Amino acid sequence: MADIDPIRDPFSERRVLATGQNMVNEAARTLRWLWRRHGPPEAVLCIGTDRSTGDALGPLVGSEMETRFPRLRVLGTLAHPVHAANLNDVLKSHRDIGEKRLLAVDASLGRLEDVGTILIGLGPLRPGSGVNKQLPALGLYHITGTVNVGGFMEYFVLQNTRLALVIQMASFIALALIASLSP
């Protein structure tokens, strides 16, 4: 990833390994590139539940952002998660977020070689697609973290995802967001 310059190389999505030196800076550079072209997010919607280790990525990011960067509007935390069962109700009660530059954050399942990476992209997130749920597409921007391997028994895989990896990825995403939004 280090050889790709997001300033000169337009993209719709960029994958960054959520471990290793300078990767937070790489993710922050990519996010700043998006903010310069389309404006920084006015709200962050962190999707997931604390009742499933793998699906807790969104609420962990939301809780960390709410604590460490309170001037950004955050929906979806460990205390108040936004998940498939309440997503439509949350969207109805916060209708104004649909009119804002929204960043949607969620966990994903993927290929073995992608576990531990985050995907930063322009365009809406399609939450629940990894577990065959039909939910509305959300956001001007999206960040997904590949927490485990998909393709078979997705709910079981999410329940048996390593918490250490999810926490590490959530911290990485929050640090990259904070760095990208700080002057």
Image (cartoon, rainbow, N blue to C red):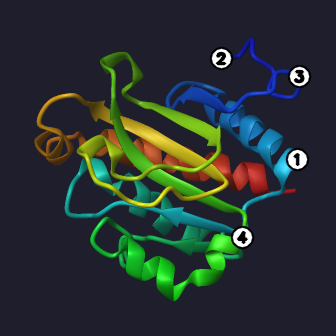
| Image position of 156 with respect to 60: above or below | above
**Closest to the observer: 107 or 92?**
92
Instruction: Report, in whole angstroms, how far the alpha carbon at label 4 lies from the one at label 3.
Output: 27 Å
Query: Where's the C terminus, which quadrant?
Result: bottom right
Task: Please report the residue visible at 45 percent of the width from the left and 60 percent of the height from the top.
Answer: 136
What x and y, as percent, mark residue 83?
33, 66
Amino acid at pointer 1: Arg
Foreground mark, 2 or 3? Answer: 3
For residue 51, say whether it is visible: yes
Amino acid at pointer 4: Lys
What x and y, as percent, mark residue 176?
65, 46
Q: Which mark is residue 50?
A: none
**Closest to the observer: 102 or 57?**
102
> In the current view of this chain or complex, which residue is farthest to the bottom?
93
Q: Which mark is residue 100?
A: 4
Q: What element carries label 3?
A: loop
